[in-house]
Amino acid sequence: MSRRSILSVLMFALILVRLQGGAAPPVAPEPAGKEALYGPAVQVGTIVDPEIAEASGLAASRRDDNLLWVINDSGNPAALFAITPNGRILGKFILAGTPNDDWEDLASFTLDQIPYLLIADTGDNMAGRTHFALYVVEEPEVMEGLQVQEGTLPVKWRIQFAYPDGPRDCEAAAVDVPRKRVLLLSKHSRSPVLYELPLLPDAAEVKATVIGPASIPRPTPEDVRQPYGFSWSRPTAMDLSTDGSRLVILTYKHAYAFVKPPEQSWRSAIAAPGVTVPLPHPGVGLLPIREGLCIQPSTGDLFVAGESPPAPVFRLKRLAVH
């Protein structure tokens, strides 16, 4: 979800909550049933620049531990923004000759010692698209200075694809470098479905392959009593750890981490319940529309960002698991 009309619905819903006696109180997180993987969400910054009007994707730099990348949703220029974790813009880079039909997620990865960014043009709210595209660019170097660094980036390669079972709205993408695959997660299915594509396709267009449904908790009875609560289980972003063992999926309510050993398939790993990563309750106004998530490569910490300015940026420290 990222259209301005849907944003208006959410804002109206929040107003209704306040009119009905204040913001919805925080509730206890869903029981994870497993040892916690991350510490509490701590706000470290806010994106206030109007150029980042609808932050729909977030990625951690592979060049600089103190740098994040952000993209805007459809209706905005085809641009990548480099920001600090506190939300300050350091760079703006336009993708040469590339449309922003419906950019929904962003992923970073390193291949053959070269850092890349993958833009997922995969949004389809109306289920009317027959073809989708992923754009890969080499991550530019960004130097912190008084002026915002600007430039144009060529697309290194493009992955054009279709789904085997009809149009799908997808706002969550990640790159599995060890397997040289791109992972995509559907949004509007009753159970989100994980798909995969070759990272280095050998054809002009490829067809996604179904991996299987992801075990994301359905909205609780309390959720559905809240404005727009029926959609809180829908995935809006995801990222994969560098070693390919931990997949973290963001929804409008919480995030969920799925961890697997090398011998296990993703089909099997996501079929079992993941570990709940609690986030601020959607009704309290701290993070009402959460659209971006990434894993910081060197620390394994999570960053989560809201969509519309002032958009908060939260960090969750990775915990040592005993």
Image (tube, rainbow, N blue to C red):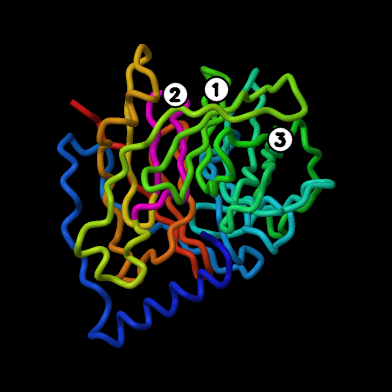
Q: Name the residue furthest top.
A: 263
Q: Position of residue 57 (x, y in %)?
A: 55, 50
> Which residue corresponds to mark 2?
244
Left or right? Give the position of 46 relative to 25: right
Q: Are marks 2 and 1 in contact (CB under 8 Å)?
A: yes
Q: Determine if the magenta segment contains residue 216.
A: no
> Which residue corresponds to mark 3?
160
Q: Are marks 3 and 1 in contact (CB under 8 Å)?
A: no
**Which sits in the foreground, 275 or 64?**
275
Q: Which residues are magenta?
A: 233-250
> Which residue corresponds to mark 1?
177
User: What residue is at 79 percent from the left and 42 percent from the top?
Assistant: 153
Q: Position of residue 213 (x, y in %)?
A: 38, 35
User: What residue is at 58 percent from the left and 36 percent from the top?
Assistant: 108
Residue type, mark 3 in image: Gln
Residue 267: which numbered mark, if any? none
Left or right? Give the position of 235 relative to 47: left
Is tag 2's residue or tag 1's residue first in the polypeptide sequence?
1
- Main SS, magenta residues: strand
SS assignment at label 3? strand
Q: Name the residue furthest bottom.
A: 19
Q: Could you classify mark 1 by the number of other residues whose Cα lies within 10 Å: few (under 14), some (14-19), or many (20 or more)?
A: some
Residue type, mark 2 in image: Gly
On screen, residue 141 above or below 198: below
Is tag 3's residue or tag 1's residue first in the polypeptide sequence?
3
SS assignment at label 2? loop
SS assignment at label 1? loop
Q: Could you classify mark 3 by the number of other residues whose Cα lies within 10 Å: few (under 14), some (14-19), or many (20 or more)?
A: some
